[in-house]
Image: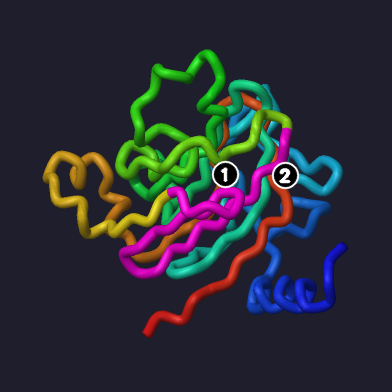
Amino acid sequence: MLTMLTLLFAMADETGFVPLFDGKSLKGWQLVAGHGQGYLVENGTIVCPADGGGNLLTDREYGDFVLRLEYKLSPGGNNGIGIRTPLTGDAAYQGMEIQVLDDQHAMYKGKIRPEQHTASIYDVFPARTGFQKPAGEWNEEEIHVEGRRVKITLNGVITMDANLDNVREADVLKKHPGLTRARGYIGFLGHNTRVEYRNIRIRQLVTR
């Protein structure tokens, strides 16, 4: 049973957050390079169906922010959360992609690189593993983006805390120009597997 003190802390913890999803429609979102059914709204969730996907992006750009959401994967599910991405090009490279993957599934386990696991900055910074819930269960994720720092918390555990300035290799910077972007769109990057999102909210940070 939650005590009043716990409830007060929970309420305070959400101060300044506003919803990005109204639970009923894709108002405030735009489908870019969609395919199949694209994205649907079902039972208060944004769904990337198994025969759909593409990039579902916000209709405005964000710079520094804290994004909170819940996601649920189907077995073998593969998606991503784009941050600071432009409207054109591959979001994982022209922006940044926070990986969302059922990485313990047989098709991936032991077959992917560290920086391809869930909660990694795809192809650049690896995340700590072992904190994602099994496919079919809801996960809570927080993405804190402030200046050159990106911190990911998955189910209450900090799985990655990266300083983008630590990337100095010329070939990596050339492959991932999005690492230098200060603003861009937030979105879901679907790959023809069912993935659901809900309780999507954001708090913008004041840049000093």
Residue that badge 2 annotates: 46
| Outermost bottom residue | 208
Residue 188's mark? 1
What residue type is disc 2 on? Ile
Callout 2 secondary element: strand
Q: Considering the image in quadrants, where does the C terminus appear?
A: bottom left
Q: Which residues are magenta?
A: 137-159
Can residue 26 be seen? yes
- Look at 61% across and 49% down and name the residue there: 155
- Look at 61% across and 32% down and name the residue there: 53
| Outermost left residue | 170
Q: Main secondary structure of the magenta part?
A: strand
In percent of width and height, residue 170 lies at: 12, 45
Residue 163 is inside the magenta segment: no
- Look at 49% across and 76% down and name the residue there: 205
Residue 140 is inside the magenta segment: yes
Asked whether the residues under the numbered discs 2 and 1 touch, taking CB atoms below 8 Å apart as contact, a structural biologist would say yes
